[in-house]
Image (cartoon, rainbow, N blue to C red):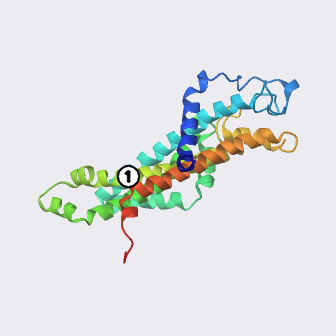
Amino acid sequence: MNRFVKHWPWLILAVAVLIALLAPLLPTQAPYAQNLLARNLAPSAQHWLGTDSFGRDLLGRLVAGTRLTLLVAVAATGIAFFGGAGLGLLGCLAGGVTRTVIYAGFDMILTMPAILLSLALMVALGVGTGSVILAVGIAFMPLFAYVARAIYERESAAGYVTAARVIGVSSLTIAWRHVMPNAIGTLLTQIAIVMPRAITTESVLSFFGMGVAPDVPTWGRIIATAAGFAEQAPFSLLFPVLALALTTLSLSMVGNRLRESLDPLSKQPAAGA
């Protein structure tokens, strides 16, 4: 029992990833098939999680939504990681005006909450999967950029980096061979922290009709469809909310555990210990 309590976030994430990978192969009903005579049905042998307001099988839509929601979250987090950490390290290496301009841009992005910035970008980019991935990715770039800058400054002050500079090693070589190996653990934990926020942001965008195309099932879109029938068909709202809450909670807990195990600063003993 204790083992299950300790590892349940990993189990939930594993199940979500398996559902996303095997979605086309799972024996679920078509997520787009409508049956207006079977609207807002409770869970049954035919529809295990019930149906929505258009008579579409909720289990089939949740499975398809899991695949698309995780795809958007992973892709957006990848853009945020490579764009934020890459540009951040580039600015630190270049220094001077380049660093000032790059981080001034990140400061401007950070002045707006991620959801509001993503909404503004979606208005400019238009509705679509690619647009929501790009919008969410840009919104979270500063989180990786500032982490990269902090790591670079911390490692640059270390004795081994100073010694490498004295013997003539280039800044790019120092960053690649010395700074990055010590930064990767912290950046990985940042990925686990950002990804649940990316899932939530995408779900909010879809809820307001600004995410993917209107007929494409994502968790946010399913919740938006079910919200107007919460009293009549509570199950159609309950299951997607549980999927969203459990997945984001699991990712957050995994991120905290990765930070404790991989971030060298979290392993340092407290002062006076």
Which image quarter: residue 72? Answer: top right
Q: Residues within 10 Å of mark 1 (few under 14, many from 20)?
A: some
Please give left or right for residue 200 compared with residue 143 in the image.
right
Residue found 39% across the figure and 72% down from its top: 270
From this view, report whether residue 132 is shown above or below residue 58. Answer: below
Asked whether, in this view, residue 259 is left or right of residue 71, the answer is left
Measured as percent of width and height from the top left, residue 185 is found at: 37, 52
Q: Nearer the viewer, residue 136 or 12?
A: 12
Q: Nearer the viewer, residue 273 or 23?
A: 273
Q: Where is residue 116 drawn, in percent x and y? A: 63, 54
User: Is residue 136 in view from this perspective?
Assistant: no
219, above or below 64, in the image: below
Residue found at the very far left of the displayed protein: 167
Quadrant where the C terminus is found in the figure = bottom left
Quadrant position of residue 41: top right
Q: Residue at x 65, y 41 (%)?
A: 211
Please report the residue visible at 63 percent of the width from the left and 46 percent of the height from the top.
246
In the displayed structure, does residue 208 sit left or right of residue 186? right
Q: In the picture shown, does residue 86 fall above or below 21? A: below
Q: Which residue lies at the image location 46% right of the left edge and 43% below the top edge?
A: 78
Q: How many marks?
A: 1
Q: Position of residue 266 (x, y in %)?
A: 40, 63
Location of residue 37 in the rendering, given as x and y in whole percent from the top left corner: 88, 24
Q: Residue furthest front?
A: 1
- Toward which corner of the image does residue 33 lie, by quadrant? top right
Is residue 233 among what the camera can see?
yes
Residue pointed to by mark 1: 185
Identified by mark 1, the residue type is Gly
SS at mark 1?
A: helix
